[in-house]
């Protein structure tokens, strides 16, 4: 087949955010828009490495994914790529892509997802590039891709190539002197095999069939119409013998059934209601592309993601993978609560604090400095791959439950008793006017620059709930990667109080329109008798302080957050 060179010109704003380029579907549908970005990804791979290389391609099944895969196939062929390994029907979860890149030693992968953002013709689409370690491209690469999008004048494609995504197997084309192959691969097989290596499936089978001491064990896993459906069916039902009724919303839908595929108490309210009935011992939900998870115990007992990763660290020896390798070190993103730090300190292992976004964990894992890490945004994962991994996190919890023979709530209470409890809340102000959002950050940045808050005593709450906190320090978080020395600055304003409580403010980097302000509130409670309080009540005074010092309500006109997680 022939290679065509198509002239084009740059589009503004093709800047990858926290996790790839995310925009409305209609933006990607513009003539040349998707092609430009794909060409810049391919150009970011040095020519000698690109020639004849293998790339993994797949996505969460959202609207426009199939079109994007055809575009990528035609362009990969024309740019000298040797093989594309594509998920059956285009389907690969984000963790599965990471798994396969590593397994077949591919050069990298292109992921078609906007994660937890709604999909469909009126929803969002996204493209993310992962490198050969299986993880999201580091900033140096995404910055280079962005720089190229501002200068692009043409792209290459093979117009005659059309890929059959619905049939497993290989097809080849001769493209001006080289062979281009497309291999459509089972979406779930490789990932399932990896999970079998990490967890004790025989033990989990016993838990699920009721042969363990915890009978009868009932759970429910909700795919939110996203990509995890086929993975849940294969692993939980086929491999572990759970009944069909244990999995919900497992058919990946182009528009996620009109829902917001984000596993939190707001968007997975149906799971919350179901767990409140008290019938199930554990419930889990996953996001569109399968890298996020929410864990609920019986009666909808909520496990914060910050606690979840800390509990997995504390109970790592219940998981055969960690029992074998040990926990090398742990890490969390900056806004995530310090619960895992306390586990790390007790174990005398290294504990890292990185900026928001999974790409910052990759170097630490590659250098074998950490084995386990997490983000407050429902992201939990380990060095078995280089993405956060929702289904893995659920299997980790099942492993802990069966080993410790305790309920989710008792595991949590026991953890708090041992380490104290970090109360944590995140308040999101979505779809705020960008200028107003920037103003809020400016106000805070100014307070950091002139140290005007330091040593001040700030008070929030009213009546009996009134509480004062003294500011210890303020900064705009910056991070120097301990492995490659790269510096990432302006990652969020931190206000740290003398008792260890924290307020953090940052703007989201995954939205597609306007701005989202995230306010993170955390406090620490060592006293066991206070551990069962509501986070909302405990953190009310701190939240008042946050709104006061940021002037958020005045500047944005918002009197309440859109979502609280
Ligand atoms: C959000 C989360 C961040 C997460 C990112 C990608 O980013 O806060 O922790 O890594 O989404 O998750 P931001 O910049 O909007 O705060 V996912 O599941 O979209 O790949
Ligand atoms: Co996701």
Image: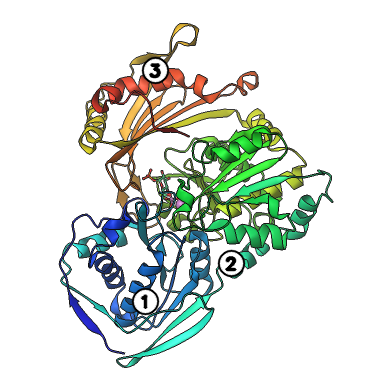
Depth check, mark 3 against mark 2: the one in front is 2
> In this rendering, is residue 93 above or below 430?
below
Residue 91 left/right relative to 160: right
**N-term-proximal mark, 1 vs 3:** 1
Residue 73 is tagged as 1
Tell me the number on the disc at residue 470.
3
Residue 324 visible somewhere in the drawing = no
> Is there a contact, CB below 8 Å, between mark 1 and mark 3?
no
Give the class, few, some or many, for how many residues have Cα within 10 Å of label 2's Cα (few <14, many ≥20): many
Q: Is mark 3 within 8 Å of ligand 1?
A: no
- The residue to which callout 2 is attached is 188
Percent position of residue 11, x then y = 18, 60
Q: Nearer the viewer, mark 1 or mark 3?
A: 1
In front: 481, or 516? Answer: 516
Per the rendering, the mark at residue 40 is none
Horizontal and vertical percent position of residue 28 = 29, 60
Query: Does label 1 or label 2 sit earlier along the sequence?
Result: 1
Question: Where is the N terminus found, in terms of image quarters?
Answer: bottom left
């Amino acid at each position: 087949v022939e290679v065509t060179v198509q002239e084009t010109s740059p589009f503004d704003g093709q800047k990858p955010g926290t996790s790839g380029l995310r925009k409305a579907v209609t933006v990607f549908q513009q003539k040349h828009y998707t092609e430009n970005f794909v060409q810049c990804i391919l150009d970011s791979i040095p020519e000698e490495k690109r020639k004849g290389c293998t790339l993994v391609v797949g996505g969460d099944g959202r609207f426009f994914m199939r079109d994007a895969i055809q575009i990528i196939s035609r362009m990969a062929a024309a740019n000298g790529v040797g093989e594309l390994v594509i998920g059956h029907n285009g389907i690969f979860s984000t963790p599965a892509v990471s798994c396969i890149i590593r397994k077949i030693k591919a050069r990298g992968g292109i992921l078609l997802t906007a994660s937890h953002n709604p999909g469909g013709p009126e929803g969002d689409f996204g493209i993310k590039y992962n490198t050969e370690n299986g993880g999201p491209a580091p900033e140096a690469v995404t910055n280079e891709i962005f720089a190229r999008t501002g200068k692009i004048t043409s792209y290459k494609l093979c117009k005659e190539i059309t890929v059959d995504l619905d049939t497993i197997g290989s097809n080849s084309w001769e493209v001006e002197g080289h062979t281009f192959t497309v291999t459509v691969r089972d979406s779930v097989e490789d990932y399932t095999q990896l999970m079998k290596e990490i967890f004790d499936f025989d033990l989990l089978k016993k838990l699920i069939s009721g042969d363990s001491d915890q009978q009868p064990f009932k759970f429910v896993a909700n795919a939110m119409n996203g990509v995890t459906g086929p993975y849940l069916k294969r692993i939980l039902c086929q491999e572990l013998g759970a009944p069909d009724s244990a999995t919900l919303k497992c058919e990946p839908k182009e528009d996620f059934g009109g829902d917001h595929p984000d596993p939190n108490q707001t968007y997975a309210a149906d799971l919350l209601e179901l767990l409140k009935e008290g019938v199930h011992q554990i419930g889990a939900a996953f996001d569109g592309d399968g890298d996020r998870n929410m864990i609920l115990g019986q009666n909808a007992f909520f496990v914060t993601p910050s606690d979840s990763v800390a509990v997995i660290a504390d109970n790592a020896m219940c998981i055969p993978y960690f029992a074998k390798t040990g926990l090398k070190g742990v890490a969390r993103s900056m806004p995530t609560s310090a619960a895992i730090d306390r586990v790390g300190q007790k174990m005398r292992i290294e504990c890292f604090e990185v900026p928001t976004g999974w790409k910052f964990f990759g170097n630490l894992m590659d250098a074998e400095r950490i084995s386990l890490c997490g983000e407050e945004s429902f992201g939990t994962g380990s060095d078995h791959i280089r993405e956060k991994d929702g289904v893995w996190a659920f299997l980790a919890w099942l492993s802990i439950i069966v080993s410790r023979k305790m309920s989710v709530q008792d595991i949590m209470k026991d953890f708090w008793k041992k380490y104290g409890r970090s109360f944590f809340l995140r308040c999101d102000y979505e779809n705020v006017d960008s200028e107003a959002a920037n103003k809020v950050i400016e106000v805070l940045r100014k307070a950091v620059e002139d140290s005007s808050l330091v040593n001040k005593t700030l008070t929030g709450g009213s009546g009996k709930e009134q509480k004062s906190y003294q500011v210890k320090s303020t900064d705009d978080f910056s991070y120097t990667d301990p492995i490659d020395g790269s510096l990432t600055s302006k990652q969020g304003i931190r206000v740290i109080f003398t008792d260890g409580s924290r307020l953090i403010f940052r703007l989201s980097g995954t939205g597609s329109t306007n701005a989202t302000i995230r306010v993170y509130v955390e406090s620490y409670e060592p006293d066991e008798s206070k551990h069962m309080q509501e986070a909302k009540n405990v953190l009310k005074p701190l939240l008042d302080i946050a709104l006061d010092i940021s002037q958020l309500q005045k500047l944005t006109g918002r009197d309440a957050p859109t979502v609280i997680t």
